[in-house]
Amino acid sequence: MMKKRIFALLMLVIVLAGCKAGGVDFSIETAPSHKYGQSFPIVIKAVEGSEAVTGLEITANLEMAKMDHGEIEVHFTNNGDGTYEGEVELPMAGEWIAEVQAEKDGETYEGTLEFDVEEE
Ligand SMILES: [Cu+2]
């Protein structure tokens, strides 16, 4: 019984360490604004430690934090400097969440980003 627990704990430590070593961190560089009938740029930055990560294929699903507007899928283009740009027409200003999915050389990375959308 004890042995099993120690083994499970060890596995957890290995998994956590593994995640950290190969992790890509995402952040919102530019949040989109909101204005009826208009789309705005959204820019995501990808880093591994302090290094910019280029060459990712990024898609994000956007949803409001406290309201259901469904999900809005955004595809991003690689700017080549660790930033990725998409364009989106959102239904309203407020708190939004982006579920980021990225892929590079068969590896996948994920991140959840919260950001505020201001009325323009
Ligand atoms: Cu809303």
Image (spheres, rainbow, N blue to C red):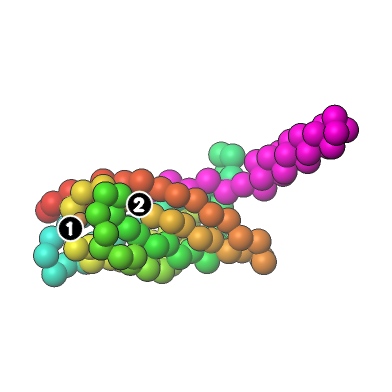
Per the rendered image, the range of residues in magenta is: 1-30
- Residue 24 lies, in percent from the top left, at 57, 49
Q: Quadrant of the N terminus?
A: top right
Residue at the image point whose x is 62% and y is 47% from the top: 23
Residue 92: image tag: 1
Q: Nearer the viewer, residue 89 or 12?
A: 12
90 relative position to 23: left or right: left
Q: Residue furthest right?
A: 3
- Residue 11 lies, in percent from the top left, at 78, 41
Quadrant in the picture for residue 10: top right
* Callout 2: SS: strand
Instruction: Count the labels in the image.
Output: 2
Examine the rendering and report whether any part of residue 21 can be seen. no
Q: Which residue is mark 2?
A: 97
The residues tagged by marks 1 and 2 sit, at their Cα atoms, a distance apart of: 13 Å
- Residue 118 lies, in percent from the top left, at 18, 49
Quadrant in the picture for residue 21: top right
Q: Is residue 72 above or below residue 46?
A: below
Residue at the image point whose x is 65% and y is 61% from the top: 107
Residue at the image point whose x is 21% and y is 49% from the top: 94
Residue type highlighted by circle 1: Met
Q: Is mark 1 within 8 Å of ligand 1?
A: yes
Query: Which of the four quarters of the rendered structure image does ligand 1 lie in?
Result: bottom left
* Callout 1: SS: loop
Q: Is residue 32 above or below residue 103?
A: above
48 relative position to 7: left or right: left
